Structures are given as structure tokens and as C-alpha cells.
């Protein structure tokens, strides 16, 4: 008899999160519960686990194991209904814990309660505790994922597709990138390269962006049918057809690092502030100070949000509320520089030598609580998370 196993009919594991808040006397003052959702990344790992049982011992190559995304539990500021959307806002992790007991002074980390945690045939019962000095703040989402701890904020590791060897050792390092008119454009200290959109990224055309007074290029963008070349003191408006300077605009401050075109305006960024410039009147019409420092001012716009880069981190910030929506750690072999959104909406990062694509972050399960929880140094907290195997 032939038995067919349909992976699409496998029921996902059900998850239930419970948060209990206690006052200084140990009295419970709040209890909140919520069911979770299991992400595609965890489902793919479940399917791989089942396939591995049947592959075991057979000659041949088992497909590579998908990334395991249930390493840590994190308490985040996200307040949206969780879905499987790529790069969905996960918020800032105000507390986290791995699967080990801990008794140190970390202001974010909790401890696994080994006495109350257990597993049976039909469920896994995780219990985590946070003392008075840890995880103080407000959160509304509980996430299982691969936490990335950093200063000043905690976030999550990213999935990456790294295209290595774009530059040889003898070539100048990358300094910027942009996606425009169906092509990837890369900047190497003023040498603008037009590249194909594929896994090869072959250079189709290149030219040196013109400037004056020997000023080197710091950033570039396309907008309003022109190419804009940012230098230390000026933004040059360039006709892309004859590649000649049409006009120049003084920058609001020296040492701006990046320039973006949006809705007829130029956005310029440096290490602490973003300026919105009217290219016709050549005046600043607004500015924006993000809640976190942005190293060298590299950024990209995403609807009503802005992604800013700081060292190996990318922060997504709401332009209206200035709240931090996402914190992503960028794993790369060399220093990340400029960032952009690619033709598919993935975050793209140019390093000194490589192009790094970030299609998503490493999260395995999410639970949105019905209301925010605020913990202070007067409170201890217990989070119980059950994974129930339904057959």
C-alpha cells in the first residue's frame, strides 16, 4: 500500500503566551494571555525535520537545514497584528532570554525557570522570569527569534544573500548604491556604475560623476529626471544624458553623507540630522532628528518610514512619531556603508566589497498581547509560553 505524506496538510504547532506581573510583595497585579502565530521560517524547519527522518542513511545529499529561529524569547515594542510579511516591524526588544538559567545583572536578560519548565508528549511548557532590574519598559509583542543584542537597542539577526567578490583587491571600495530605472547603480568614490539586476550584477556602463573644485562624491540619487551628486559642500544637479552639471546647491551643513529624492524634494543626512531641501528654492523646508545616531548618515526612505544605518545595524523609524519600528543586525564580512530598498522591497546594503540582500529577519513565532504591559523596577515578571502539538 502506498502512503502519501502531504507536507501542506501538516498542522502548525499552536502557541499560547501568558504574562504575569507581580508587585514588590509578590502579589500578582496583572495577567495577560494571547495565542501566537508560527512563521514560515519555523514551518520550513518542521518540514525539513520530517524529511531528515526519511533521508537518514540514504546515499545522497539532504537539502541544507533551514535556519533555526527559536533560539531566544524576546519582549518587543511592536503593536501590530503579526503576519508572515517580509521585514515586518518587530519593534525594539526591551527584554530577552535564552534557554538557560541566568542570575547576572544584565538589564535586559531574564532567566529560564528550570523548576517550572517541562515537556510532555503533547506540549512544551516554557517559563521565564525577569527580576526587578531587568526588562523594564513597555512591550506588547512576544517573539521567538535569533536575538541580536547591541547598543543602544536590541534587535534580530537578518537572513542574508551575500554576493561576494563584486570588487577585486585593486579596485576602489564601494561608497553607495541606488536602484533606479530597472538597474542597480553603484558608486565608487565618484565612479558611477550601471549594473544589471541579476545575481551577476554585470557593469553595463560607467562614468565619473562631474563635480567642481576637486570635491569627491559622497552619495548620489536619481530624481526629477536628473542625477544628483553629493559632495562635501555641494549637491550637483547633473543631466544624465550629456552627464554635465546643470546647477549646484550648497549643503545645509558640511560633511553630509547621503542624498535621497522623494516627492520633488532632496533629503540629505549626516551623523545626527536629516535635512529636507527644496531643489528649486535651494532652501531647507524641514529637518528630522532620529531617536538613534546614524553613523555617517546613510539612510533610505520606505513610505512614511526611514531606515538609518549605524555600524552593523539598520533602524527603521516612523517619520511622524519617531518611534523605532525595527532593529536589524547586518551580518557582513566588511563594514556596511549605504543602504537602499531593492526592486523587490528587500533591504540592500553595500559594504566596502560586497552587496548584501536582507529579505527578512530571523523570527520563528510571534504573539501580540491584547494590551501593552509596562514593567518597572518595582515589578518582577513571569512569561509562560506553551507550544502545543495538535494531531
Image (cartoon, rainbow, N blue to C red):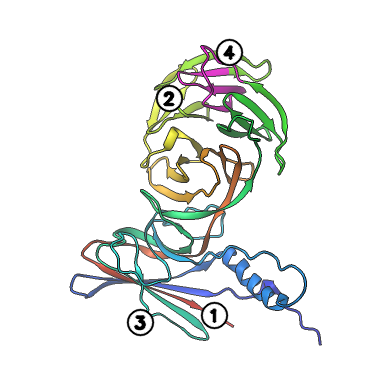
Name the front one of labels 3 and 1. 3
- Report the residue marked by disc 3: 115
Q: Quadrant of the N terminus?
A: bottom right
| Residue displayed at 56% across by 59% down | 84
Image coordinates for residue 303, horizontal then vertical, percent: 51, 41
* For the residues bearing labels 3 and 4, Cβ distance under 8 angstroms: no
- Based on the picture, tell me whether residue 224 belongs to the magenta stretch: yes
* For the residues bearing labels 2 and 3, Cβ distance under 8 angstroms: no
Q: Which of marks 2 and 1 precedes in the sequence?
A: 2
Q: Which of marks 2 and 4 precedes in the sequence?
A: 4
- Report the residue marked by disc 2: 255
Q: Which of marks 1 and 3 precedes in the sequence?
A: 3
Secondary structure beneath disc 2?
loop
The residue lying toward the viewer, choosing from 225 and 102, is 102
Q: Quadrant of residue 40?
A: bottom right
Mark 2 is surrounded, within 10 Å at the Cα level, by few (under 14), some (14 to 19) or many (20 or more) other residues, namely some
Q: Quadrant of the C terminus?
A: bottom right
Please give the label number shown on residue 246. 4
| Residue displayed at 48% across by 16% down | 249
Image coordinates for residue 155, horizontal then vertical, percent: 44, 54
Query: Compared to 82, does 332 lie above or below?
Result: above
- Report the residue marked by disc 1: 389
- Based on the picture, tell me whether residue 123 belongs to the magenta stretch: no
| Residue displayed at 51% across by 40% down | 335
Mark 3 is surrounded, within 10 Å at the Cα level, by few (under 14), some (14 to 19) or many (20 or more) other residues, namely few
Q: Which of marks 3 and 2 precedes in the sequence?
A: 3
Mark 4 is surrounded, within 10 Å at the Cα level, by few (under 14), some (14 to 19) or many (20 or more) other residues, namely few
Tell me the CA gap for discs 2 and 3.
56 Å
Amino acid at each position: 500500500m502506498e502512503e502519501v505524506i502531504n507536507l501542506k496538510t501538516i498542522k502548525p504547532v499552536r502557541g499560547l503566551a501568558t504574562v504575569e506581573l507581580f508587585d514588590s510583595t509578590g502579589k500578582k497585579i496583572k495577567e495577560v494571555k494571547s495565542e501566537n502565530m508560527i512563521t514560515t521560517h519555523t514551518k520550513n524547519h518542521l518540514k525539513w525535520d520530517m524529511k531528515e527522518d526519511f533521508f537518514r542513511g540514504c546515499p545522497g545529499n539532504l537539502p541544507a537545514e533551514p535556519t533555526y529561529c527559536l533560539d531566544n524569547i524576546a519582549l518587543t515594542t511592536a503593536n501590530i497584528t503579526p503576519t508572515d510579511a517580509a521585514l515586518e516591524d518587530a519593534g525594539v526588544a526591551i527584554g530577552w532570554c535564552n534557554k538557560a538559567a541566568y542570575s547576572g545583572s544584565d538589564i535586559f536578560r531574564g532567566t529560564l525557570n528550570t523548576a517550572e519548565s517541562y515537556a510532555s508528549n503533547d506540549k512544551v511548557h516554557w517559563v521565564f522570569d525577569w527580576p526587578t532590574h531587568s526588562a523594564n519598559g513597555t512591550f506588547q509583542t512576544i517573539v521567538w527569534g535569533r536575538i541580536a543584542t547591541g547598543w543602544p537597542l536590541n534587535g534580530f539577526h537578518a537572513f542574508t544573500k551575500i554576493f561576494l567578490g563584486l570588487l577585486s583587491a585593486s579596485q576602489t571600495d564601494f561608497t553607495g548604491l541606488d536602484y533606479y530605472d530597472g538597474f542597480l547603480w553603484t558608486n565608487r568614490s565618484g565612479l558611477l556604475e550601471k549594473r544589471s539586476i541579476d545575481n551577476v550584477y554585470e557593469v553595463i556602463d560607467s562614468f565619473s560623476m562631474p563635480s567642481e573644485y576637486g570635491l569627491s562624491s559622497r552619495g548620489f540619487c536619481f530624481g526629477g529626471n536628473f542625477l544628483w551628486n553629493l559632495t562635501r559642500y555641494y549637491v550637483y544637479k547633473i543631466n544624465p544624458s550629456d552627464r554635465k552639471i546643470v546647477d549646484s546647491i550648497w549643503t545645509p551643513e558640511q560633511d553630509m553623507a547621503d542624498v535621497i529624492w522623494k516627492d520633488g524634494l532632496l533629503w540629505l543626512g549626516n551623523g545626527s540630522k536629516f535635512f529636507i531641501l527644496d531643489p528649486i528654492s535651494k532652501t531647507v523646508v524641514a529637518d528630522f532628528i532620529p531617536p538613534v545616531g546614524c553613523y555617517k548618515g546613510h539612510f533610505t526612505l520606505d513610505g512614511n518610514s526611514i531606515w538609518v544605518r549605524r555600524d552593523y545595524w539598520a533602524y527603521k523609524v516612523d517619520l511622524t512619531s519617531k518611534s523605532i519600528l525595527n532593529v536589524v543586525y547586518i551580518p557582513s564580512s566588511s563594514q556596511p556603508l549605504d543602504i537602499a530598498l531593492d526592486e523587490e522591497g528587500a533591504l540592500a546594503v553595500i559594504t566596502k566589497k560586497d552587496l548584501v540582500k536582507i529579505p527578512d529577519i530571523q523570527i520563528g513565532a510571534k504573539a501580540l498581547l491584547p494590551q501593552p504591559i509596562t514593567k518597572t523596577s518595582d515589578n518582577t515578571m513571569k512569561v509562560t509560553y506553551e507550544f502545543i502539538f495538535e494531531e
